[in-house]
Image: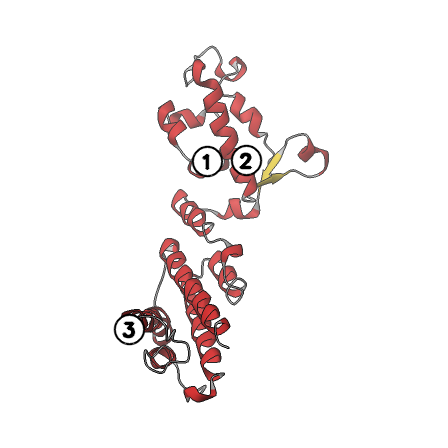
Amino acid sequence: MHELSLTVPDVQVLLALEPEELGAKLLFLLRKRLRFPMEMFQPNSLINELWDQHFLSGRNPPYPSQQRDEVTLALSEAWAWLEAQGLIVPAADTNGRNGWRNLSRRARRFESEAEFAQYAVARTLPKQALHPRIAGTVWMAFMRGEFDIAVLQAMKAVEVAVREAAVREAASGISNDVVGVKLMRRAFDPKSGPLTDMEAEEGEKEARSALFAGAIGSYKNSQSHRDVQLSDPAEAVEIIMLANHLLRIVDARTSAKP
């Protein structure tokens, strides 16, 4: 892939790139090169273009020969990352077994490196780390790029979990009609909240109540009452993981009940 040396001429810069960063550059260089979307290619052959005189036509390799092994390893890691993400896939039949690859449907949909960067951030939300209440619907909405919907569903799951746990405590007086910040304040009331840890210090009780009320007020109520455009996947990941943490707290407080 001789075009790479025009995009990243400095070998030290190339070697400093993470596999996903270098993979993004390879992907878009490859898309420009392919004559049609389903044209096959061999990653190893593309790497060899940087060193093989058949491709260099008498020119010197674009990177120092003494760093060939390092460059080859970096490129191999990038190709492996692309394949692990399902962005390049084995070609059909024996072609795939012989090292030929195709761009996946997802890879052909990316319009820019910026869009690809968003996808790479989106992959940082691990489904296996999510609470069962949000591991399905929230994760799928997030992976579709519907970040505002994913955040709303995550915080709604927190609200539902708190309500269910609080309503089970008959003495709490909390009904299914209590919602939002009011529900959080009553469920975690420092004096009488059914989900409050009565053995905690007063300051901790107040902080826990404020944590839940603040999260629901900031991220669930605002999404429910008006259109809130959330386009940054990194921000969405942070909010979803906050909801995930709150759900774990509810589970812990529920299991602590006699």
Disc 3: which residue: 202
- Residue at the limit of the structure toward the left, as seen here: 203
Q: Is residue 241 above or below residue 117?
A: below
Give the image quarter of residue 95.
Answer: top right
Marks 1 and 3, Cα distance to the nearest angstrom?
48 Å
> Dots 2 and 1: beta carbons under 8 Å?
yes
Q: Secondary structure at mark 3?
A: helix
- What's the residue at 46%, 54% (across, down)? 125
Residue type marked 2: Ala
| Residue 117 visible (yes or no) | yes
Number of numbered discs on residues: 3
Q: Do tag 3 and tag 2 residues touch (Cβ < 8 Å)?
A: no
Disc nearest the viewer among 3 and 2: 3
Nearer-the-camera pick, 226 or 252: 252
Residue 222 coordinates in the image, percent (x, y): 33, 72
Q: Residue 20, relative to residue 242: is it above or below?
A: above
Asked which secondary structure carries label 1, the reply is helix
Q: Quadrant of residue 113?
A: top left
Q: Earlier in the sequence, mark 1 or mark 3?
A: 1
- At a point 37% along the width and 78% down the height, the residue shown is 180
Tell me the tag on residue 80. 2
On screen, 222 above or below 234? below
Label 2 element class: helix
**Residue at 28% across, 73% down:** 202
Q: Which residue is mark 1?
A: 19
Q: Earlier in the sequence, mark 2 or mark 1?
A: 1
Disc 1 versus disc 3: nearer the observer: 3
Q: Nearer the viewer, residue 139 or 55?
A: 139
Instruction: Check disc 3 and give the amino acid type.
Output: Glu
Q: CA distance from mark 3 to mark 2?
A: 53 Å
From mark 2 to mark 1, how far is it between C-alphas? 8 Å
Q: Residues within 10 Å of mark 2 (few under 14, many from 20)?
A: some
